[in-house]
Amino acid sequence: MIQLRKAQYSDARAIAHLHAAGWRDTYKNVMSSDFLENHAQNERFSHWQTLLNQSNRDMAVFVAEKEGNVEGFICVMLKKDAQWGTYIDSLHVSSALRGQGAGKKLLHHAAEWVRSEDSESPLYLWVFEDNVRAIHFYQNLGGEIVEHTVSDMPSSDNAPVFRISWKNADRLVVSSC
């Protein structure tokens, strides 16, 4: 059974591992192989240590555990953009749990949190155009492609990305049920 809980500082290594593994599995055609193989793990560990060490009321990170192991996570940031609202910064699920509803549960849980903090806030995320599986996943949960541009991530070589948006957390909560 999958259990959801708020992430703790001690989860930084497990989250970084999932994040880097997700990038290696999904973004081989988007991000540089040198970065993915030699730098992503340490860069993500440093990133998550910093993020989880902050006391930020406008940010939440939740993890999905199965049998005591962190197998997925989501990070959301309230009021990140004046027009687009709450930013879904990351959503990753281990390959072992993909297709078992963990991503949907994490999104639903995060949307509930957003709704409790700012019920009118729209939500958005960026996804690489190459990640067709994720695009379909988000669209099946009511997300709409509202922008097409290029990534500003240094390791992505200006790969094309979509902004996917929900009008508010209610839209995401309802579509996740």
Image (spheres, rainbow, N blue to C red):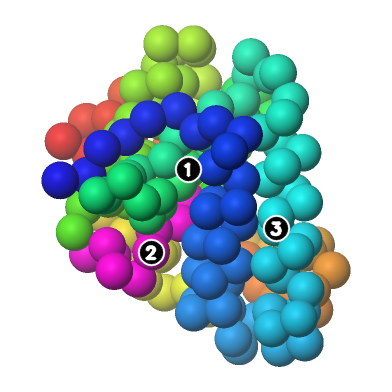
Q: Main secondary structure of the magenta part?
A: loop
Magenta-drawn stretch contains 97: yes
Report the front residue among 60 and 132. Answer: 60
Type of the residue with mark 1: Ile
Residue located 54% across and 51% down the image: 15
Residue 94: give its label.
2
Classed neighbour count for the residue bearing mark 1: other residues with Cα under 10 Å, few (<14), some (14–19), many (≥20): many
Q: Which residue lies under the disc numbered 3?
A: 44
Residue located 42% across and 40% down the image: 63
With 169 as the anchor, is 23 left or right in this view? Answer: right
Q: Which residues are magenta?
A: 91-99
Image coords of residue 10 (percent x, y): 58, 38
The quadrant where residue 139 appears: bottom left
Q: CA distance from mark 3 to mark 2?
A: 15 Å
Q: CA distance from mark 1 to mark 3?
A: 14 Å
The quadrant where residue 40 appears: bottom right
Image coords of residue 125 (percent x, y): 55, 47
Image coords of residue 151 (percent x, y): 73, 65
Q: CA distance from mark 1 to mark 2?
A: 12 Å
Type of the residue with mark 2: Ser
In the picture shown, does residue 105 fall above or below 91? above
With 172 as the anchor, is 174 left or right in this view? Answer: left
- Per the image, label 2 sits on a secondary structure element best described as loop
Q: Which residue lies under the disc numbered 1?
A: 74
Classed neighbour count for the residue bearing mark 3: other residues with Cα under 10 Å, few (<14), some (14–19), many (≥20): some
Specify which label sits upstream in the sequence, 1 or 3.
3
- Check whether the beta carbons of the residues at disc 1 and disc 2 lie within 8 A of each other: no
Report the front residue among 33 and 87. Answer: 33
Quadrant of the rendering where the C terminus is positioned: top left
